[in-house]
Amino acid sequence: MMKNKIIAIGIIVVSISIFGSCKKDEMPVLTPPSTGGDTTLNLIAGSESGANAANSAFVDFSTNQITLSERASWDVAFYCGNDFRVTLNYKTAALTVALNKNDLTTVNAADTVGLALDLSYSTTDFAMVDSFSDNLAYTKIAINNVLAENKVYIIQRGKGGGIAARPWYKIRVLKNGAGGYTLQYARITETTFRTLDITKDAEYNFKFISFDNGIVLSEPKKDDWDIQYSSALYKFPMGSEEIPFFFSDIVLINYLAGVQAAEVLNTQFTYENISKANAQSLTYNSSKWAISDKWRTSTSGAMAGVKTDRFYVVKDQIGNYYKLKFISFHNSEGGVRGKPKIAYQLIN
């Protein structure tokens, strides 16, 4: 097993490094990059069950770096690219609704009467969550160029994966003159609000905001991770329709930084024998959900486990090809829930 550098980010954990103290941006690029190995991702932060593990794990294959981040450490995220977009916390299943008001001081508890901001596990939930499209233009919180026309949104901060209910917030997001964002936010019952200016940072995909703690570090720099293993809100087939559903054990790729992934069945190539030429011949998926839950069966019952008939090839931001397979994630297959085991290797 290779040695992984493990760090933790978020609002209640301290950055640590078990096998080394250098961050990726403080050391020269590895030549060649890491050849990989196998590792266990410990998502459990305390006494919670593995199915409700509090952490997400970000993995950077080329440096063997694993970064842990508390799922509930943030509430809204502000895109650092050219567009102005705001996303809800999909790792807590946060929900939102727009009001026909433009002033936070006029919003109070009366505006929440009869408002259902909970997952009903039906198609009506799509009205309260960000689109599962990779296009950030379909996020729920809109930002208008005319400042006076920006709406007030009520946010239910999410209870997915065992997270305790927290007070609802009212927010309003504006563009500011410095090329960033201005966030106005308060609890529903508060008559005044706080204001926070958010500056874009090109080294990150997003800037993350906690209503309790302001700007927080909840994701590594965009060049410092390839995949994320977490619990998250995603779509699920229910009969003839799809609904938003909260998943434990789901894998996302760093699509905004150019990471891509391809699913490979053992009948096409094997994990042990795939060559670089084989990897280059594959068709890659650039969606955030390229891997998602496709690598496993259900997460409950005796049949839960890793699908052993497939693996993945991940092409990172600088053109390295890594083969990735999931070894175990569930007690029913001899693994430990909340401590998934994966293997990845550089394809030379």
Image (tube, helix red, strand yellow):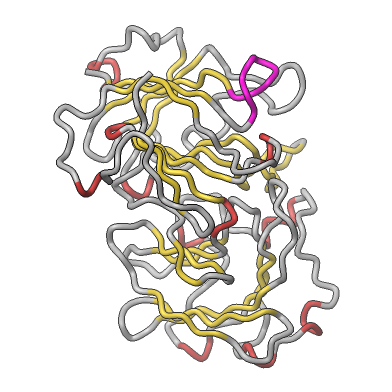
Total count of labels: 0
Rendering quarter of residue 231: top right
Residue 261 figure quarter:
top left
Horizontally, residue 262 falls left or right of residue 233, namely left
The reply, left or right, for residue 205 in relation to residue 98 is left
Q: In which quarter of the image is the C terminus?
A: top left
Task: Determine if the magenta segment contains residue 148.
Answer: no
- In this view, the residue in front, 210 or 151, is 210
Q: Between 150 and 253, which is closer to the camera in this rendering?
A: 253
- Quarter of the rendering occupied by the N terminus: top left
Residue at coordinates 57% horizontally, 55% vertically from top-left? Answer: 131
At 53% from the left and 70% from the top, the residue drawn is 213
Nearest the viewer among 189 and 43 is: 43
Residue 29 on image: x %, y %: 17, 39
Q: In this view, does 68 lie above or below 333?
A: below
* Residue sitting at x 33%, y 52%: 221
Magenta part mainly helix, strand or loop?
Answer: loop
The residue positioned 27% from the left and 33% from the top of the image is: 62
Q: Which residue lies furthest to the right in this view?
A: 114
Magenta extent? 329-337
Where's residue 146, x and y in %? 45, 87
Residue 314 picture location, percent across and down: 35, 29
In the rendered structure, the answer to whether residue 189 lies left or right of residue 78 reads: right
> Where residue 47 sits in the image (x, y, percent)?
69, 41
* Rendered view: 113 above or below 325: below
